[in-house]
Image: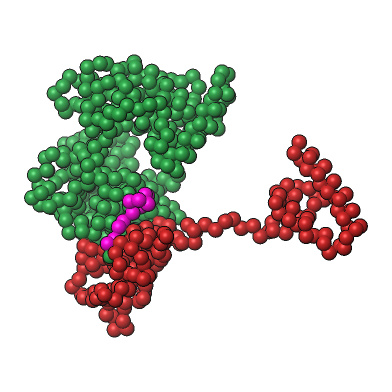
Amino acid sequence: MFGLCYILFHSLNKIFWVKHIMFNSVSSFFIPNRARRLSRPLILTRVPAGFPSPAEDYIEGRIDLNRELIRNPLATFYVRVSGDSMEPVIHSGALIVVDRMIETRDGDIVIARVGSELCVKRLRISDNGAVWLSSENTIYKPIVITEEMDFEVWGKVSHAIHTF
Amino acid sequence: MIGLIDCNNFYVSCERVFQPALRSRPVVVLSNNDGCVIARSEEAKALGITMGTPYFQIEYLIEKKNVAVFSSNYTLYGDMSARVMEALQSFSPETEIYSIDEAFLRLEENFEETGNKICKLIYQWTGLPVSVGIAPNKTLAKIANRTAKKLKSSVFEMSDAKTRDEVLRETPIKDVWGIGYNSTKKLNALGIFNAFQLKNFDRRHARKLLSVTGARIVEELNGETCLPLDLAPAPKKSITCSRSFGGHVESFADLHDALGCYLVRAGEKMRKNNLTARAVTVFLATNRFSKQPQYSNSHTIELINSTDSTRELREWTRRALAVIYKKGFLYKKVGVILQGLRSESAETIRLRGEKDYQKDKRLCAALDQISRKFGRDAVRFGCRSNSKNWQMLAEHKSACYTTNLREVLRIAN
């Protein structure tokens, strides 16, 4: 029923267009037609006489933050951070995305385990192999990692999500 | 070659990933209702806490030895297990998930090197320590894994026959996969105590004494393959959902409530696998450890039409419960089994009530969606009494770090 109405509407429209062309310049032909077609892209493709949607080949699905922010789902964990030691990079209360699959390098923000504590810090590795963890907030002193410390990088912080 | 990958003290390790302070403490995880110990850290094992020890028996140790106690958090363990199993797929196209913390893998080459790589990467990606046993078949891979754990190394390979014989000599037969308590007794009576003796046991004899399964074990110990990798799990034949209560339950209404709760879970599971049930069984039991009067019974109703509607099944479970319910007993456990499961596509159209059934199907689909989005208790059938004594005891449960945004790991920085 709807289809029939549509064809009727479409053909009426065509008559209108014929009139339109007769009284106006041809260049204006595409402008209104295009707007109408975008609003009903699915139906138009069924009518052989209609123009195929120029957008059809470019439809790509919506932006999915899961896909953008999480590269390795099986090794990704979420962590809620409190405290000001990483201000102004990570605010207190931020939700951070931690990817354990990415190899960490000098300068990365990481979750580190020092003994029985977990902390969020910037990992620094110098050319001579010295390792320390620095806070972004300068009131906190860096933690120098020594051989006898029980230390490991828990994961790399890949994103911080801050809700306003 | 077959590798058996096993997560070391899996439940304890899961807790330790998110609470590193537990790394230096003895840790135990308790069964449902905080009944008995089902997982122990190495430190807890060293204290002499054995598997299956009732919690109340070790309570005195808890404070004295600073033991950390956890109720089982299957939401967390299930998610961590799924991560490990997914990770294992990247090492071999042929994997068989054997249990929540074990998987068999077919390995093509560089066995020991691959084993070490698996241990290193699974730990890096998930924080869970695993050990790998490598051998020509599943039975031997199990033994190789046990040996790895005993030697406190992460990988143990048994590809050559000489190493194998040495290890088998050190393996008591009760530790061979598939040899149970009764078989152990029978074999011991014949003077067979270790796996090497079992390997050299006459096969025809083994078949007579231990049936086909026993004969297969003997052949596998000899390095032949009798148990191929099970790549596609067989479709479920039945779904059971039952729990022991935290306290005791007496009234029919409370039992029916609990049953309804388990049925919702069983129904969800069934629909997720596109199955329908042909029969439903309800069972109940009193606490067999108490001195109160004892009673247990079950009743099965075969359904005229197979169904996957929780609403219909609810009615049938109520009827089944009414048949077996007796007043005056303190019940400890009730459960429901959905049986005769078949693919939904094999369903026939009903002669009567097809329209209502289709309505039910839509209702259940909507309910499943709601419970996925808002949690299982967002919408419920019927009205539920406020009695809490049938709910499970879980006083020491950790957070669902990986599945609930409100419970993610917190770091004070």
Q: Residue at x 21, y 65 (%)?
A: A115
Write down which chain is painted green.
Answer: B
* Lateral position of residue B266 relative to residue B164, left or right: right
Question: Image height check: is B212 above or below B89?
Answer: above
Q: Residue at x 22, y 49 (%)?
A: B196
Q: Which portion, as a residue range, is magenta? A: B402-412
Quarter-of-image position of residue B58: top left
Q: Position of residue B86 (x, y in %)?
A: 41, 54
Q: For the C terminus of chain B, which image quadrant? A: bottom left
Residue A55 is at least partly visible in this image = yes
Question: Image height check: is A143 above or below B245?
Answer: below
Which residue is outermost to the right? A22
Q: Residue at x 32, y 49 (%)?
A: B400
Q: Position of residue B125 (x, y in %)?
A: 36, 61
Badge count? 0
Camera-side residue: B152 or B158? B152
Residue B404 on the magenta segment: yes
Quarter-of-image position of residue B318: top left
Q: Residue at x 35, y 76 (%)?
A: A106
Q: What is chain A's hue in the picture?
A: red
* Lateral position of residue B31 relative to residue B100, left or right: left
Camera-side residue: A49 or A40? A40
Q: Position of residue B119 (x, y in %)?
A: 32, 61
Which residue is outermost to the bottom? A128
Camera-side residue: B217 or B329? B329
